[in-house]
Image: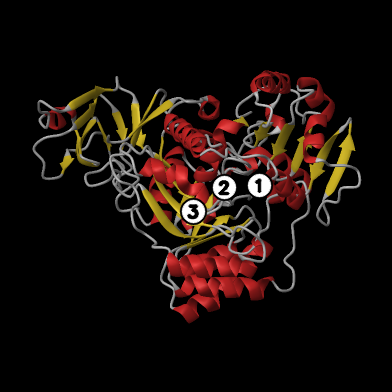
Amino acid sequence: MTNQPIRDQVDEADLIVHNAKVTTLQDNGSEADAFAVRGERFVAVGGEAEIMRLRCNRTRLIDVGGRRVIPGLNDSHLHAIRGGLFYNLELRWDGVQSLQRGLEMIRDQAKRTPKDQWVRVIGGWSPYQFKEKRMPTVAELNDAASDTPVFVLFAYSQVLLNKAGVAALKLTPESKPAEGDHYEFVDGGAIIRGTAAVNATVAKLPPLSDVGDQLNSTQRFFRELNRFGMTSTVDAGARVAYPDDFQAVATMASRPKFPMRISNFLTAQNAGTELKAFEKWTAGEKRGGNRAASRLNGYILEGAGEVLLFGAHDFENFMAPRPEWKEQVERDLTAVTRVIASRQWPIRIHATYDETISRILDVFEPVFKEAGYRARWAIDHAETIKSGNIARIKAMGGGIAIQNRLAFAGEFFLERYGEQAASSASPLREIVDAGIPVGAGTDATRVSSYNPWLSLYWIVTGKTVGGTQVTSPKNRLSREEALRLYTVGSAWFSGEEDVKGRIAPGQYADFAVLSADYLSVPEEQIAQFRRWVEAGMPA
């Protein structure tokens, strides 16, 4: 039922969207037929006849033909700045349905890859999405690209290199990976297993060194996010050099029509330097100011995270056992947290496992009390969190940012931990019902696709991209609940829940027009649609 119009004090509109089914996400659950925008904010929402009275000579009218309109999507954990820097360099297997097609894509890409670059498939896929239900082999990579180096990354679990890739990295059977990791040389190429070795190999790949190329890559990536209905993201921290590797996004933010609203967190760059880095940043960087020239809250330095200390980082490699903290981790994490908390910077921290969350909270609780900490803080991921730590986070005033990483690795989680553990990973219903601030996202671009609809599909169905049922019905949410986490919920993590995430007067005028109705299509279509939306933001 359409509400009576809700409006600010306004006589004229810059934009009117009408003939729509508007999901407002206002607290009363109302829908609307139309809305009006002035500047960067919604000024009226309601029935078509009332909203059209705000039309004037300069008003732009958009008739959406009865389609569903939702608030712009907001990924609360997307590595957007790093994703932008590398977008032009990557071949994506997101949504590719057969390994044969994936190998054809490598073959085609190799023909146009410059001599000093690689064909690199980095994240956003699962072997179980393919009809073949398996990983590629090194021999297949050699056949697809005999002379061009090829790098295929699955999550942070495994890397496959063809023969040319091994030669480019100068790897030999005498090469030594990190302790506990493994190089397997086969068919002239290699399979690299173990998180440290995988990350070390990723770091050796050549970047885009030209600032103009970085800018073009970032522009294309942000436009791609818009095409999925995304208008905002919280970058929870990327291991790219600050501020040097932030030039592209800073340049875009300084220009008109910046296409996203981004809040970013600064993350530790190298093991052993974490304390010095956060001492420098918290003392010297101005946090919270808008660095975008023409977009409200367009580009914000938000806080510290998600890596505060490398020793505390329990990488989500579900093909390997859960990592254990070493003896000195609590001491070192306490020192870093004390610096950040004393400056009242918001904090994000990565924690996959409940055991890790317990130890983090054991550090945070006394440090926060000692510092009189009042800023926002959150646990990222929390796939295996249990009731006790949900209650602790609630009592301490924290949030939880959840993603769909298990949509890409759920089969491996099932194999290692069993159906009972998988059925409650992540326990979304319990977290939401506890009243904890929750935001939704992807953790793209390496362990997951940046496609938000795959994450919404995971939240609603608990199924992987390969169709495997992982979570039980009690740990799934309704479509509107999932959408709320991806909009209003995510806005909490940048302190914007009062101005972002709803279609309501006074809120930022960020919206997405859907070509199919998310609220009524069959569940499987939520995952199958790609680029089925278009984001709207004021010019």
Q: Residue at x 84, y 26 (%)?
A: 139
Question: Which amino acid does the dot numbered 2 rest on?
Answer: Asn
Q: Residues within 10 Å of mark 1 (few under 14, many from 20)?
A: some
Specify the quadrant of the image occupied by residue 512.
top left
Question: Which amino acid does the dot numbered 1 rest on?
Answer: Ser
Query: Which is nearer the eye, 417 or 127?
Result: 127
Q: Residues within 10 Å of mark 3 (few under 14, many from 20)?
A: few
Percent of width and height locating residue 444: 56, 42
Query: Pointer 1: what residue?
Result: 423
Query: Pointer 2: what residue?
Result: 475
- SS of the residue at dot 2? helix
Question: In the image, is 481 to the left or to the right of 367?
Answer: left
Question: In the image, is 531 to the left or to the right of 462?
Answer: left
- The answer to whether marks 1 and 2 mark residues whose Cβ atoms lie closer than 8 Å is yes
Q: How many marks?
A: 3
Query: Pointer 3: what residue?
Result: 243
Percent of width and height locating residue 521: 46, 25
What whole-number distance in Å separates the C-alpha atoms at marks 3 and 1? 42 Å
Question: How is the rendered protein coloured?
Answer: secondary structure
